[in-house]
Amino acid sequence: MREVSFKKLIKRAGLYYFPGDEQPFSGRAISYFTLFFIPTKKVKSRLVLENGEMHGEYLSYYRNGHIREKGHFKFGQKHSEWLCYYLDGELKSRYSWFDGKKHGEWIWYYESGKIMYKYNYIHGERKK
């Protein structure tokens, strides 16, 4: 799988391209943390693009290397279960998307693990 820095990709008409390429980009795009505007070797996020659209696994990280957020895209839209974590690795929130719309149970947790908020969505609309 082709791997490039996300900063190098160019967005045209809603699709991502690698400079000089006529076809939309397919492969893995990586962004890095910076230190005084200079890129470091520490990965900030990874995502997969297919034919210029975000499509596949997405991962973002804290500077300490722990996962910050993970989920999936489907043809440019958030899709499936997404998880967010506190800096120490404890679960912060769990939520689901279906074709870019909030769908299913959305839960936020305190660092202690107790539930802070809990909501249900159906096709983007919050249910009581």
Image: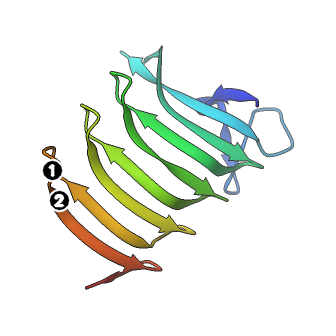
Q: Which residue is mark 2?
A: 115
Identify residue type, mark 1: Tyr
Q: Secondary structure at mark 2?
A: strand
Give the residue furthest to the front.
113
Q: Position of residue 67 (x, y in %)?
A: 39, 34
Q: In this rendering, would 115 be left or right of 21?
A: left
Q: Residues within 10 Å of mark 1 (few under 14, many from 20)?
A: some
**What is the number of callouts on the image?**
2
Q: Position of residue 28 (x, y in %)?
A: 67, 34
Q: Are marks 2 and 1 in contact (CB under 8 Å)?
A: yes
Q: Secondary structure at mark 1?
A: loop
**For residue 9, what is the image quadrant?**
top right
Q: In this rendering, would 59 be left or right of 126?
A: right
Residue 80's place in the image compared with 48, above or below, is below
Q: In this rendering, would 126 be left or right of 110?
A: right
| Front residue (pair 105, 126) | 105
Identify residue type, mark 2: Ile
Residue found at x 47% / y 80%: 123
Q: In this rendering, would 120 be left or right of 118?
A: right
Its colouring scheme is rainbow
Q: Position of residue 102 (x, y in %)?
A: 43, 70
| Front residue (pair 113, 55) | 113
Q: Residues within 10 Å of mark 2 (few under 14, many from 20)?
A: few
Residue 65's place in the image compared with 18, above or below, is above
Q: State the mark number for residue 11.
A: none
User: Disc 2 to disc 1, how far (Cα)?
Assistant: 6 Å
Residue found at x 59% / y 40%: 47
Q: Position of residue 99 (x, y in %)?
A: 57, 69
Q: Which residue is mark 1?
A: 110
Residue found at x 65% / y 42%: 48
Residue 81's place in the image compared with 17, above or below, is below
